[in-house]
Image (spheres, rainbow, N blue to C red):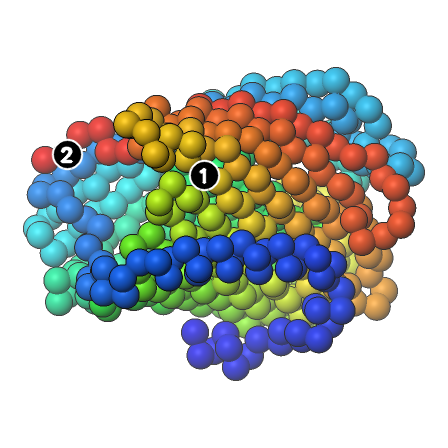
Amino acid sequence: MPIILTQFNFAPSKIVRKLKMKRLYLVLFFLGIIISLSAQEKSDSIKTIPFEWNFNKYRFGGYGEILYQHMDYGPNRNLDPKGSPSDNRGYISVPRAVFSFDYKFRKDIILSSEIEIEYGGTGSAMELEYDEAGEYEMEVEKGGEIELEQLHITKMFLDGKVNLRAGHMIVPVGLTNAHHEPIFFLGTTRPEGEMAMLPCTWHETGISVLGYLKNFKYELMMVNGLDPNGFSTPNWVGSGRQRLFEQSVMTNPAFAARLEYTPVKGLRLGTSGYYASKTSGNSSKPQHMKGLDGRVYVFSADGQYVNHGVTARANFIYGNLSDSKAISQVNRTIFRKTTYPCSEVAEGAMTYSAEVGFNVFQFSNIKERLIPFVRYDYYDTMYQVEEGVTRKPRYERGNWSVGVNYFILPSLVVKADYSSRTIDPSSSVDYNKEHTFGLALSYTGWFSQK
């Protein structure tokens, strides 16, 4: 973390000038709710944080989602000067089904694994890429995927206070990556901003040190870096996770860290960061990236309060990329044969979101939970651009969602929500709004253990 803090060029004055202050105040308001509600708890209500591997020999479980969405807008925002044209379309899918297996070789050595099946399995598919003049592209992995999301071995020391982990693991940068199971967010889909800006769920291969110290949970890791040839307009560095080839380049590794603090029951405060000094060394064709660094910084802060029937979450992420103009030029000219997007990438990207809900059965004897909620999600994957890179205001978006979660069981939930997305909310251009109705059935849990 010291590397991130000393190197990170946060430029707070520029951010404050750009933000719509009323939306930032909204996020701060939700954070205030989190902190003020937690203040009602006794400060000594949590002495220690229980260790997470509370099984004897093995356990099997997982999580998954079934999703239906109806949109009143077309998929091509570039077709009309006013934005996406009116449309009437619906989709149903299985975004992910994850199967987890943990095994203890002995009580202090644990193997953890997760296999993720996205959108029904593997295959290839054609994609109509509107960000590249409506070209058809073959997506060799997007017709559906079977992917190893986690495979690592952890050695425990000092009863879990300090642990050493090696293998393929989650990069816990941002609230959703750190807590990505569907019962941990209220919408039918994950917050848009994090999915647009970073890989989500983000998993890489490397080593980490993690553990618990009183009310703190920490993790520091070194993993393979991102491939700058995958950076793009709609997904910033999120599309740079190495997925095209059998091996991941680790010529220049990246470093990530996360710290969580749980001072009282129900309250969790977190901060995380990511630093890659030279992503250009991880290119599949590094000879085309000579003289470039592609340095990436990411900073995140988040909070969550779940107690007394209240669920409140808030999150903020800012990221910066060096040599964005030069990387955009390289990607546009030599990588047409890959499935990477060939679009410009911004120097800076930013997102923040907040959601709050309340269990209306809180004061009854009903064991199920019914939680109406409201969420606001703002993101801009072209928040800051270098001179010579065209800023596309249509990638600045604000999204209001209202909905309800019905928890039949603590690990089984039916969700419904309605969202209204505003394109380029900071300008006077009146782009067409985009409305989505969603239904989801989500679960998570351990099915068997010994």
Classify 182 as above or below 440: below
Q: Which residue is at the front of the view, 440 or 145?
A: 440
Alpha carbon separation for disc pair 1 and 2? 32 Å
The reply to whether residue 168 is visible in this rendering is no
Report which residue position mark 2 lands on. 449
Residue at 19% across, 55% down: 50
Mark drawn on residue 358: 1
Report which quarter residue 331 is drawn in. Answer: bottom right
Where is residue 104 shown, x and y percent of the image? 13, 46
Where is residue 121 shown, x and y percent of the image? 46, 25
Please, what is the three-letter code of the amino acid marked with disc 1? Phe
Question: Secondary structure beneath disc 2?
Answer: strand
Check whether the beta carbons of the residues at disc 1 and disc 2 lie within 8 A of each other: no
Q: Residues within 10 Å of mark 2 (few under 14, many from 20)?
A: some
Please, what is the three-letter code of the amino acid marked with disc 2? Gln
Question: Secondary structure beneath disc 1?
Answer: strand
The residue furthest bottom is 6
